[in-house]
Image: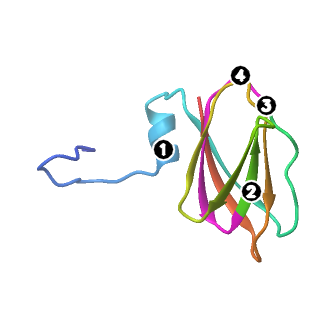
Amino acid sequence: MKLLFNETVVEDTISIEEAITANHSPFKMSKWALKKGLTSPVDVHKVKEYWLISQGKGNINYNDEHMIEVKKGDFVFMESNKTHQVENTGTEDLIVFSIWW
């Protein structure tokens, strides 16, 4: 299996979950949805985390200091030990891919 992204053509592709498992990566990931009008619980943890917003829009309360508006296509980085919570302000489910390490 080749996963080179230079001048050669990728001969085989695998999902990110397979790559993480096959390479014993320190990264973990999840996909989750928040229904319209709902707010997630406050979360805080030792790991660093990226969120990719793949559908919808919302507001992230980050460390009780910043309100971040997000929409489809946005990436948000969260440092270790910082609180975060998201409210779905859109008309459809807010779908988030989360990657942490």
Name the one closer to the observer, 4 or 96: 96
Q: CA distance from mark 1 to mark 2?
A: 31 Å
- Mark 4, mark 2: which one is toward the viewer? 2
The numbered disc on residue 18 is 1
Amino acid identity at mark 4: Lys
Q: Earlier in the sequence, mark 1 or mark 4?
A: 1
Q: Secondary structure at mark 2?
A: strand
Q: Quadrant of the N terminus?
A: top left
Binning the other alpha carbons within 10 Å of mark 3 as few (below 14), some (14 to 19) or many (20 upward) gives some
Q: CA distance from mark 3 to mark 4?
A: 7 Å
Mark 3 sits on what residue?
44
Mark 2 sits on what residue?
59
- Give the x, y percent position of residue 24: 49, 27
Q: Is residue 10 magenta?
A: no
Q: Which residues are magenta?
A: 44-57
Q: CA distance from mark 2 to mark 3?
A: 17 Å
